[in-house]
Image: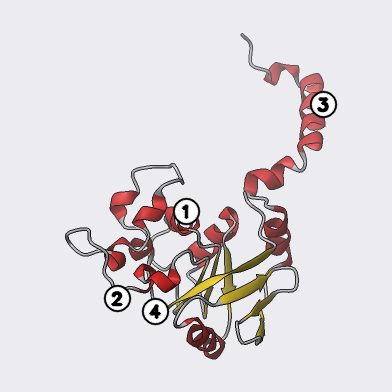
Amino acid sequence: MQPFIHLDGRAAPLAIANLDTDQIIPKQFLKTVDREGLGKGLFYDLRFDDQGQEKPDFVLNRPAYAGVSVLIAGDNFGCGSSREHAPWALLDFGVRCVIAPSFADIFYNNCFNNGLLPITLPEDQVHALMDEAKGGNHIFTIDLESQSVVAPSGKRFAFSIDPGRKEKLLKGLDAVGETLQHADDISRFEDRRKLGQPWLERRA
């Protein structure tokens, strides 16, 4: 998993409350467990019309927001089903951070498991960041170590994060990577078990 330490990038305002995981990545894109390529399905029904043509009024289709890496979203982002494809699609599209007043619990947890930083800020601060993101081509700074968001105007917004989750993001550790930090201890335990309980070993 890619570590998250510091990010300088464009931000797009997505002022839609209760944006659920089926809107983030519709069900027709869930046939794969490959994380690559899911970006094409991100917000598909919002980005494209019935003929598959881009809707020019949708924020992520506007040239000024090309290459965004931060989304500034509405309340209860990521509600609905528990599909892990939602953070996968955001990451594949290039989004590394989502800022919102609140997140659905399962989506929030899935973000940390995949290297996507979800930041919760008060609603008035989120609206202030949305205002600064309007027009595009503005660089926002997300610094996980100092737990701060710096807007193009220079305004700084502090956010809270669980220390354990922060440490794992900084180190790029998912659940498997966290476990492998104890690989030597695991190997020693297995060696002791083989000696003390040899009957548990599978016979050829």
Q: In this orientation, which residue lies closer to the viewer: 175 or 32? A: 32
> Mark 1 = which residue?
92
> Mark 2 = which residue?
57
Looking at the image, tell me whether mark 4 or mark 3 is earlier in sequence order: 4
Cα–Cα gap, marks 2 and 4: 18 Å
Tell me the element at label 1. Answer: helix
Cα–Cα gap, marks 1 and 2: 22 Å
Q: Position of residue 93 (x, y in %)?
A: 45, 57
Q: Which mark is residue 192?
A: 3
> Mark 4 = which residue?
17
Kindly identify the amino acid type of the residue bearing the numbered disc 2: Asp
Kindly identify the amino acid type of the residue bearing the numbered disc 1: Asp
Q: Are marks 2 and 4 in contact (CB under 8 Å)?
A: no
Q: Are marks 2 and 3 in contact (CB under 8 Å)?
A: no
Cα–Cα gap, marks 2 and 3: 64 Å
Cα–Cα gap, marks 4 and 3: 54 Å
Q: Position of residue 12 (x, y in %)?
A: 46, 74
